[in-house]
Image: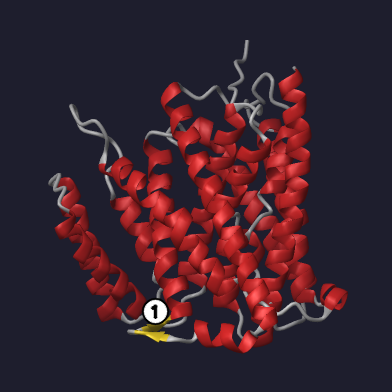
Amino acid sequence: MTIRRRFLAEADGEETSFLGALLRSETVGGSIALVAALVAIVWANLDFASYSGFRGWQLGPLDVEEWASDGALTVFFFVAGLELKRELLVGSLRRPADAAVPVFAACCGVALPALIFVVVNRGTDNLGGWAVPAATDIAFALAILSVVGSALPTQLRAFLLTLAVVDDLIVIVVIAVFYTSTIHLPALLVCAAAFAAYAVLQRLRVRSSVLYLPIAVLAWAAMHESGVHATIAGVVLGLLTRVVPDEGEARSPAERLEHRIAPLSSAVAVPFFALLSAGVQLTGGTALLGEPLVLGVVLGLVLGKPVGVLGGTWLITRFTRAELNEGLGWRDLAGVGVVAGVGFTVSLLVSDLAFTGSDREQAKTAVLLASLIAGLAGALVLGRRNRRHRGA
């Protein structure tokens, strides 16, 4: 008799506790980022000159907008690196058989929106933005799930977290490979040396932040000067951090850092980026939807994400031994797929990297519109499923 593996098994107590703490912090952070985005939109439409002047205000080597995208988001991506390594070594990605479903679903959830964008924008100069609708915003997706899904199965939350982390990894690789035009080798070598020093200190079990902080700053500065987007430094440092505690050690360095830095990321760094990036002038009305750039982003996030996630899940469960866990339905996964269409943070970043001028404003407007649609639709679907599970 063939035994079929249930890929969304019940999470153990430690994993449940971790997810609960993460959901609470991301809910607060997502709410603050939403407020920051709304402030940016209102400010930009009431007085775009002052908003633009604020973004261009020079503060040391960078202007304020660059500090937001290259600096603040490095903190966000550092936490993403910590989460990814944790999932790979002690979380839901540590067993390849269990990881196969959310990983494949995430890959399809990235590929289909990008394909939709390319099809809609074929023959235009917009094809460089194919990665804009490919990203899922962890903070907002988990915030929506935690607000409307209190009775949803814990394994569904674990699936969304895994999906979003893998999604982030794919888009990070895309940023590093496809949105890097010039490489400055000396700066990249300095960055590599800083990474090596960080890894050695981790291996030697050094705990002093006095040593780590200058190395992290050097790695970030060298990465920025190398031509590769500076946020990649945050990801690499997160991946180099030790996540498995030693014998007799209460918490690993990754756990300690995440406990300290995650609130800073979700409540300060991401909202600061939202304030500096989401300020677009809402002009053009419904005519904007006729623009291939806008249509490609909206269809990619609102339609491509849920179809890609759900289709990828169906394919791998159809042609492998995996099956849905008892009590978990395809409608639950459909709700997660819709919520995954909330691109926001990373999609806005890719918009900055892919476009300039009016095209960039169009792309950002499309990201905000699509994220709003996906967020509301996802909340509606998951809210109905939540009531069903509560009454079960």
Circle 1: element type? loop
Tell me the quarter of the picture where residue 312 sits: top right
Residue occupying the point 60% across, 23% down: 6
The residue at the far top in this view is 1
Q: Picture coordinates of residue 377 (x, y %)?
A: 78, 48
Residue occupying the point 61% across, 66% down: 37
Number of callouts: 1
Q: Looking at the picture, tell me which residue is in the foreground, 15 or 199.
A: 15
Instruction: Please say if 144 is above or below 365.
Output: above
Instruction: Please say if 320 is above or below 59.
Output: above
Q: Is residue 334 left or right of residue 322?
A: right
Using the rendered image of the protein, determine whether residue 59 is visible from the camera's viewpoint: yes
Using the rendered image of the protein, determine whether residue 131 is visible from the camera's viewpoint: no
Q: Picture coordinates of residue 130 (x, y %)?
A: 65, 69
Q: Is residue 322 left or right of residue 121?
A: left
Instruction: Please say if 195 is above or below 329.
Output: below
Q: Looking at the picture, tell me which residue is in the foreground, 214 or 116.
A: 214
Q: Looking at the picture, tell me which residue is in the foreground, 359 or 75.
A: 75
Q: Which residue is mark 1?
A: 227
